[in-house]
Image (cartoon, rainbow, N blue to C red):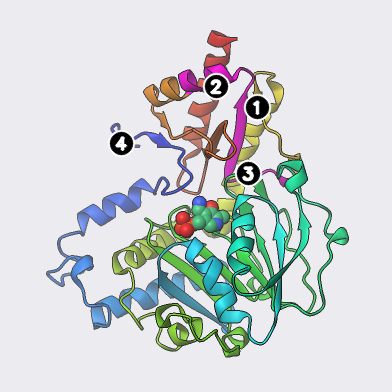
Amino acid sequence: MTEARVYNFSPGPAMLPEEVLSQVRHELLDWRQTGMSVMELPHRGKAFQTLAVEAEQDLRDLLNIPANYSVLFLQGGAQAHFAFIPMNILGGFKNAAYVETGIWSRQSIAAAQNYCAVDIVTSSKASHYTTIADEKAWQIPKEAAYLYYVDNETVNGVEFPYVPNSGEVPLVCDMSSNILSRSIDVSRYGLIFACAQKNIAPAGLTIVIVRDDLLKRTPLKETPAPFRYDLQAEQKSVLNTPPTFIWYFAGLVFKWLKKQGGVAEMAKRSQQKSQKLYQFIDQSDFYHNPVEPRYRSRMNVIFTLADENLQQKFIAESTENGLTNLKGHRLVGGMRASIYNAMPEAGVDKLIAFLRDFEKNHR
Ligand code: PMP
C-alpha cells in the first residue's frame, strides 16, 4: 500500500482497491485513446457502450447471473429503492412480507408501508438485532408480492449464513454491504439490489438484478420513469443519463475481482479476515461483540469497549495510527470495523495489533 494511504474501516463510502484507483488516475485524461476522460463520454456513444456491456458481462460472470435476469445500473443509492421496489413489483398485491433483522430492514419496512401492507415475518428487534430467529418459526403469508430481507445488516453487524426459503413467493434481497463477497445462487432470488459505495465503487450507483417475470408486473403509475425497472431493462439502463463514471469504476473493480480469483477467493479472504478479528475480540474481556456467532457479519465487525469513557481516546489513537473511521453508527454506538473486499488482510492485522496495545495501555 502507498505510504500516504491509511486503512479505512468506513462502512461506505469505503476503501477501494488501490490498484483500481491507480488505473483510474492513469487513464483519467484520455480513456482508451478517445482523447477524452471517461467522464466526458456521451452515455449512448459507442465508446461508453462498449464499456457498459463489458462491465455487465463481467458482473454476470462473477455472480453467474442466469440469462433470464436483467442487470440495471441506476442512479442513486439503496434507500431510494426501498420505495422503488414496492412501486415496481407489488403488481396487484396488497401486501409484501419483510424480515426485520436490523436498522436497514427496519427502514425498508417503513418505506414499503407507504405503498402496501407489510407482514413482518420475523423480527429480532427484542434482541437489539443480535440474532435472527430460526427460519422455521417465520410466518410467511402465502399471498405476498415478495419476501424481502437484508443479507448483511451493516449497522448491526448481522449477516445471513443461508438463503431464506421463500417458497413460491419471490425473494428480494438488499445485498448492499456484502455483494461480491461470496458466491450466490442468483436463481433463488426474484430481485437483488446493492448500492455501490461499499463493495463496488464510489457512491451514486445502485445495481439491480431482477428476474424478467417480475418486470411484467405493472408498476404504480407514480413510479418515475428513470426508476421503472421494466423501462430501464428495455433501454439497457440508459433511459436517463446513468452515473457513467461510477459505472466505469465498477467495471474496473469487476476486472480486479476476476484477477484476484473471483468471489470464491473473496469469500475465503473475508472469512479469514473476520474470523481473526472475532477471535481476538472474544478472547478479550476489554472488547465485546454482542452478535450470536452464527450470524456475525464477515463485512462489518461491531464491538464495544468495556469502559465507554475510553471511546474518544480509542478513536483519536486509532486514527493517529492510520486506522480510520472505526466509530460505530450513531444509532448503536460503540465501534465498527468494516472490512469489505478492498481491505487487505494486513489492515486487519494492524487493527488487531492496535487493539492489543490499546488494551494493554488502558486497562
Ligand atoms: N442498505 C444497506 C444494507 C446499507 O448498508 C445502506 C447504507 N449504509 C443502505 C441500504 C442505504 O444506502 P444509501 O445510503 O445508498 O441510500
**Relative to 349, is 57 above or below?**
below
- Would you say residue 315 is visible in this rendering? yes
28 inside magenta stretch: no
Q: Secondary structure at mark 3?
A: loop
Of the image marks 4 and 2, the number of the one nearer the N terminus: 4
Q: Which residues are magenta?
A: 295-314
Picture coordinates of residue 109 (x, y %)?
64, 62
Picture coordinates of residue 254 (x, y %)?
43, 62
Local packing at callout 2 (Cα closer than 10 Å; few below 14, some 14-19, many 20+) is: many
Residue at the image point whose x is 66% and y is 33% from the top: 278
For the residues marked 2 and 1, what is the alpha-carbon distance in whole angstroms? 9 Å
For the residues marked 3 and 2, what is the alpha-carbon distance in whole angstroms? 20 Å
| Left or right, residue 325 beside residue 168 | left
Residue at the image point whose x is 84% and y is 65% from the top: 139
User: Which residue is identified by label 2?
Assistant: 355
Q: Are marks 2 and 1 in contact (CB under 8 Å)?
A: yes
User: Which residue is identified by label 3?
Assistant: 156
For the residues marked 1 and 4, what is the alpha-carbon distance in whole angstroms? 29 Å
Of the image marks 3 and 1, the number of the one nearer the N terminus: 3
User: Which residue is identified by label 4?
Assistant: 2
Q: Are marks 3 and 2 in contact (CB under 8 Å)?
A: no
- Would you say residue 178 is visible in this rendering? no
Between tags 3 and 2, which lies in front?
Answer: 3
User: Which residue is identified by label 1?
Assistant: 281
**Amino acid of disc 1:** Ile
